[in-house]
């Protein structure tokens, strides 16, 4: 009877026929098998763990900063005035069976989620997966990263312990340092003088942001299904043909199994590694010694520490503190550039075609160099957040570390850009030689004419596709407008396009539909001109 009813629903109703069509499409749709796809599964597993543990923790948490006298089972705090939020967290930790495990699991998943999303962003960037038609997916992934940081930061403050109080005091000072509107924003955020009603306000944020995150994730999933999965060049692969495993059931089972594995690892870590234990209530007059922010917000803290002292001026009857304005401006520009980079590259290259084949990072040296420079910039800011701990561990002065990081912030990205471009070019030259002559065998053979040559082994078809496959768009020079004039913006775009594509090596087999395979033969050991 159940089978008959199911068949009736699938065949006679519009929703049933639509569902049957979707299932059939998913069974026939192919998904490329790549290790980098696992970062998305890790992020999804982290979100599931966060949602499940977060819903459970909601029933035990009291989002209130109203003071009460603690009378729980933790003897060192008997008779101490604490907030209701801290009291509920401490009772959850030491009295509720499994409560500490839930808190630790929630916290570890919150730390893993931004890492998985960052890896996805890096993979998409270096392989060119952000190009048409996936520019919207890139922006959504960036917004998911922002939402994960916002959710983590708001949850960081909810225990109302000494560590969260220290972090909130820093945030309060930063907000107050914003000219003109700083006092108003601080009052709105904290609900009055510090600490105000910050727990109640952040609790609302901590509940709303995950809902927005899930919505963004759903939209991105829909776009991924619509545009299908990109893949690297290879035999049988093209802009229209995908080589891989069926989405249902193969890819779904693999993803589900890996999600279970990630969840198990998170549970194991949460059960054995304690992070951020709640031992003392927040106190506006005290701060935790050696406190550090969660790793994903470290670059924000590092930006504040790198500003030289005394960067202030008096203007319009107000004090403009660049110790706050400069980091906020730099970080804001940095984040905006990440979000809009696909549109910037598309404008520079004038590339309006759809791309379903991924690039090898070495084949786009300028884009790869830009990515490595951005990573270096982020790494310097992130490392600066622990400058005080580094100074203590290595017996160095804090000032010397800050000065070194200031130099590294200015010089490091430039050096990283130049080195990365040269490395990519060298790798392209090597790939070109291998595609032409094959792999060196080390065997030296004497020919009948007395000439000595080295034997080479030809690469197989898969390797030939990997070396010579993929698209190589050409540079589009600056073009005059309808009036026959070159605008300043178009002239700048032409120069950027020339710089973006310069020193590019065209692969040996690019002009053919199939890569040309060298047969095992003796070839000259000399290097051919390839530029």
Image (cartoon, rainbow, N blue to C red):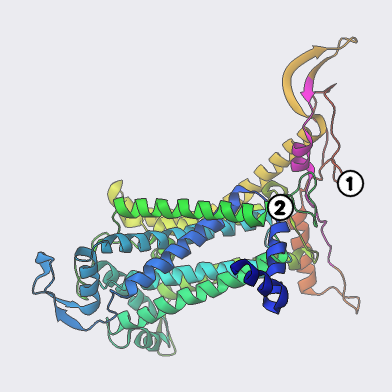
Secondary structure beneath disc 2? Answer: strand
* Of the pair 355 and 96, the residue shown nearer to us: 96
- In the rendered image, residue 408, in percent from the top left (x then y), is placed at 48, 54
**Residue assigned mark 2:** 231
On residue 511, the disc is 1
Disc nearest the viewer among 2 and 1: 2
Give yes or no for residue 359 being in the magenta stretch: no
Q: First in sequence: mark 2 or mark 1?
A: 2
Which range of residues does the magenta coloring cover? Answer: 455-478
Quadrant of the frame with the C terminus: top right
Side (left or right) of 459 relative to 54: right
Q: Residue at x 72, y 77 (%)?
A: 12
Q: Is residue 168 above or below residue 292?
A: below
Side (left or right) of 525 relative to 400: right
Side (left or right) of 100 relative to 211: left
Instruction: Kindly indicate the quadrant of the structure image that contains residue 356.
Output: bottom right
Quadrant of the frame with the N terminus: bottom right
Name the residue at the front extreme: 1
* Of the pair 46 and 476, the residue shown nearer to us: 46
Q: What is the crowding at mark 2: few (fewer than 14 residues within 10 Å), some, or many (at least 20)? A: many
Q: Is residue 525 above or below residue 281?
A: above
Is the Cβ of the residue at disc 2 closer than 8 Å to that at disc 1?
A: no
On residue 217, the disc is none
Q: Is residue 446 above or below residue 113?
A: above
* Of the pair 79 and 53, the residue shown nearer to us: 53
Is any atom of residue 139 visible in this view? no
Q: What is the crowding at mark 1: few (fewer than 14 residues within 10 Å), some, or many (at least 20)? A: few
- In the rendered image, residue 226, in percent from the top left (x then y), is placed at 71, 67
């Amino acid at each position: 009877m159940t089978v008959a009813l199911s068949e009736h629903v699938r065949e006679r109703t519009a929703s049933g026929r639509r569902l049957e069509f979707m299932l059939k499409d998913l069974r026939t749709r192919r998904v490329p098998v790549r290790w980098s796809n696992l970062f998305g599964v890790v992020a999804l597993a982290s979100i599931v763990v966060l949602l499940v543990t977060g819903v459970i923790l909601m029933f035990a948490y009291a989002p209130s900063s109203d003071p009460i006298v603690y009378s729980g089972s933790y003897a060192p705090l008997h008779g101490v005035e604490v907030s209701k939020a801290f009291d509920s967290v401490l009772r959850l930790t030491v009295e509720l069976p499994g409560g500490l495990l839930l808190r630790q699991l929630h916290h570890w998943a919150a730390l893993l989620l931004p890492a998985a999303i960052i890896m996805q962003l890096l993979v998409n960037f270096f392989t060119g997966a952000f190009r048409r038609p996936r520019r919207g997916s890139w922006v959504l992934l960036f917004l998911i990263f922002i939402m994960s940081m916002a959710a983590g930061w708001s949850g960081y403050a909810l225990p109302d312990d000494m560590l969260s109080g220290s972090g909130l005091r820093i945030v309060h000072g930063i907000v107050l340092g914003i000219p003109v509107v700083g006092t108003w924003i601080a009052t709105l955020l904290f609900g009055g003088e510090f600490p105000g009603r910050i727990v109640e306000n952040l609790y609302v944020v901590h509940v709303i942001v995950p809902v927005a995150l899930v919505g963004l994730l759903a939209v991105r999933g829909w776009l991924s299904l619509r545009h299908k999965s990109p893949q690297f060049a290879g035999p049988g692969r093209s802009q229209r043909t995908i080589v891989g495993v069926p989405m249902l059931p193969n890819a779904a089972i693999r993803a589900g199994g890996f999600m279970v594995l990630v969840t198990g690892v998170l549970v194991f870590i949460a059960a054995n590694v304690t992070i951020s234990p709640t031992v003392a209530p927040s106190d506006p007059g005290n701060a935790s010694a050696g406190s550090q922010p969660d790793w994903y917000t470290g670059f924000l803290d590092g930006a504040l520490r790198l500003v030289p002292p005394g960067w202030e001026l008096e203007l319009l009857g107000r004090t403009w503190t660049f110790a706050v304005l400069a980091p906020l401006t730099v970080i804001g520009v940095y984040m905006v550039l990440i979000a809009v980079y696909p549109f910037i590259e598309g404008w520079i290259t004038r590339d309006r075609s759809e791309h379903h084949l991924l690039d090898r990072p070495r084949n786009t040296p300028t884009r790869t160099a830009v990515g490595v420079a951005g990573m270096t910039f982020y790494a310097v800011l992130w490392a600066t957040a622990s400058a005080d701990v580094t100074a203590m561990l290595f017996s160095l002065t804090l000032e010397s570390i800050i000065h070194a990081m200031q130099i590294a912030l200015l010089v490091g990205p430039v050096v990283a850009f130049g080195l990365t471009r040269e490395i990519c070019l060298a790798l392209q030259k090597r790939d070109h030689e291998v595609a032409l002559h094959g792999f060196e065998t080390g065997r030296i053979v004497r020919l009948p004419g007395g000439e000595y040559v080295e034997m080479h082994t030809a690469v197989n078809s898969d390797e030939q596709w990997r070396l010579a496959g993929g698209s190589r768009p050409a540079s589009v020079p600056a073009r005059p407008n309808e009036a026959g004039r070159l605008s300043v913006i178009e002239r700048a775009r032409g120069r950027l396009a020339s710089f973006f594509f310069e020193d590019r090596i065209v692969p040996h087999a690019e002009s053919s539909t199939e890569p040309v395979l060298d047969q095992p033969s003796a070839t000259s050991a000399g290097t051919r001109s390839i530029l």
